[in-house]
Image (cartoon, rainbow, N blue to C red):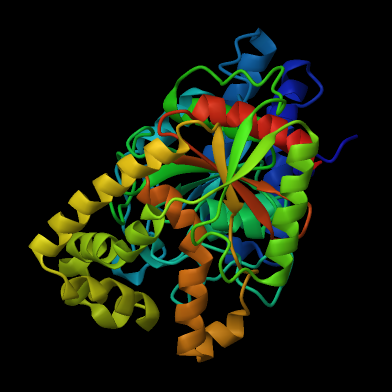
């Protein structure tokens, strides 16, 4: 028998469809693996075993009656602890929200449930989603699958590790500056950052609403496509016949290749060479406005984040990890006019990006310029924390600043991903391109 805990969500769904896999047995297998795993409590904040078994029983009945709701009907997945779940704690990795229990599911959780997915539980995350490292001394810091001494990437840290350690078939996270893509890259997964406002954020604890997006962390591009459809309640992107031949890809020279550590640099070059060998046309591209947009990050992110959370934070600041508190409070340094002017300038930068990239199917860059940093050093060395946190999110933030959709793929080198960034609301085309790139990289 195949190991269900390492199969893709799509393959599990096909196994259910032909009767080789029973949804109840599958869910019990995952719940047993979670319970037995020594790192369970560092990955899952809460396991929803009763809900999972009830949903699996319903999926079993539908499968037996030939009335499955989707290919993912009966497939167990995990949810980052900022998606509201009815009568189950949703605390966003923060003591500020301790014992917060929503009355209803987030819209994306409702949609995924209507597609038949099984909710295994809620996964740990960076505090209020405001860090790319995944370090959270307030609740738990999940482990990196490739280095037990390193952080896993954030803020969707537990979402990634639940999949990487075989404790969920897919994880659902959020991405404001790289929070789906960094943990996906550092744990050798596929991660999809969706276009702002495409996937519903209703019932999702916010960080920066203008930048917040929802997306899957998965074992394959197909799984990402299946999960996107489930989150939205829309048709699945058609990945059949995807090819790289004749596809035009640009390697972003501006900022994205600066200060690369040795492993990410070598992995990116090797991956780009394989894409080119598979027929892609790859060209260098400079977009000077990227540098200008990056300089706006401080005002755009911290002002919105602090404006969203100021009253809650300042009522109990001692409950927060000091590094995260410092990041939030930096938003107080900017005025309303600063924020408005920064957004006006960013819109101009976005137009320049659109013009510069219009002739390409996607823009390539290393997902992260660094490998997962050492957990203990992050806890004891303030300067190291600041440097590594900013570097971890630098490349992914380009996609957020420019309002793009983006996909990170494993390169075959542990904890090194390659990112494909594409125009807003072109997820289906990006996933087709990603499927072709995935095949070339394997």
Q: Is residue 351 above or below residue 208?
A: above
Within the image, what quadrant is residue 376 found in? bottom right
The answer to which of 211 and 254 lies nearer the viewer is 254
Give the side of residue 368 with respect to residue 209, left or right.
right
Give the side of residue 130 with respect to residue 1, left or right.
left
Give the side of residue 208 with respect to residue 161, left or right.
left
Residue 137 coordinates in the image, percent (x, y): 48, 78
The answer to which of 312 and 37 lies nearer the viewer is 312
Residue at point 36%, 51% (across, down): 401
Q: Is residue 60 above or below residue 340?
A: above
In the picture, the quarter occupied by the C terminus is top right
Residue 267 coordinates in the image, percent (x, y): 74, 58
Kindly tell me whether residue 7 is visible in this rendering. Answer: no
In the picture, the quarter occupied by the N terminus is top right
Residue 207 coordinates in the image, percent (x, y): 31, 57
Which residue is the extreme one toward the right?
1
Residue at point 44%, 34% (across, down): 423
Residue at point 49%, 55% (across, down): 396
């Amino acid at each position: 028998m195949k190991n269900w805990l390492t199969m893709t969500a799509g393959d599990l769904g096909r196994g259910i469809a032909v009767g080789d896999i029973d949804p109840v047995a599958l869910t019990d297998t995952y719940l047993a693996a979670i319970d037995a795993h020594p790192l369970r409590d560092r990955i899952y904040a809460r396991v929803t075993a009763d809900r999972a078994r009830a949903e699996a029983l319903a999926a079993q009945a539908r499968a037996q009656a030939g009335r499955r709701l989707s290919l993912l009907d009966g497939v167990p997945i995990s949810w980052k602890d900022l998606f509201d779940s009815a009568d189950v704690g949703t605390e966003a990795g923060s003591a500020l929200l301790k014992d917060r229990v929503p009355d209803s599911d987030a819209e994306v959780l409702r949609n995924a449930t209507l597609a038949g997915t099984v909710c295994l539980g809620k996964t740990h995350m960076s505090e209020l989603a405001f860090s790319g490292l995944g370090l959270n001394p307030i609740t738990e810091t999940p482990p990196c699958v490739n280095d037990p001494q390193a952080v896993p990437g954030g803020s969707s840290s537990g979402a990634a590790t639940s999949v990487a350690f075989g404790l969920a078939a897919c994880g659902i996270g959020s991405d404001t500056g790289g929070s789906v893509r960094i943990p996906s890259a550092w744990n050798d997964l596929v991660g999809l950052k969706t276009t702002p406002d495409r996937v519903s954020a209703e019932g999702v604890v916010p960080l920066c609403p203008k930048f917040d997006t929802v997306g899957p962390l998965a074992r394959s591009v197909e799984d990402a496509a299946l999960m996107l459809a489930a989150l939205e309640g829309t048709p699945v992107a058609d990945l059949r016949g995807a090819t790289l031949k004749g596809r035009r890809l640009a390697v972003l020279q501006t900022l994205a290749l600066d200060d690369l550590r040795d492993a990410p640099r070598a992995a990116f070059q090797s991956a780009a060479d394989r894409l080119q060998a598979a027929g892609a046309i790859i060209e260098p591209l400079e977009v000077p406005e990227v540098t200008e947009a990056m300089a706006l990050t401080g005002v755009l992110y911290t002002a919105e984040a602090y404006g969203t959370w100021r009253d809650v934070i300042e009522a109990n600041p001692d409950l927060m990890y000091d590094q995260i508190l410092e990041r939030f409070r930096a938003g107080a340094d900017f005025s309303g006019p600063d924020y408005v002017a920064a957004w006006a300038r960013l819109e101009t930068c976005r137009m320049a990006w659109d013009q510069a990239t219009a002739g390409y199917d996607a823009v390539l860059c290393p997902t992260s310029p660094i490998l997962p940093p050492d957990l203990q050093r992050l806890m004891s060395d303030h300067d190291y924390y600041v440097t590594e946190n900013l570097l971890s999110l630098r490349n992914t933030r380009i996609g957020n600043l420019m309002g793009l959709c983006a996909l990170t793929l494993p390169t075959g080198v542990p904890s090194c991903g390659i990112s494909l960034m594409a125009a807003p609301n072109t997820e289906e085309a990006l996933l087709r391109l990603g499927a072709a790139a995935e095949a070339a990289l394997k």
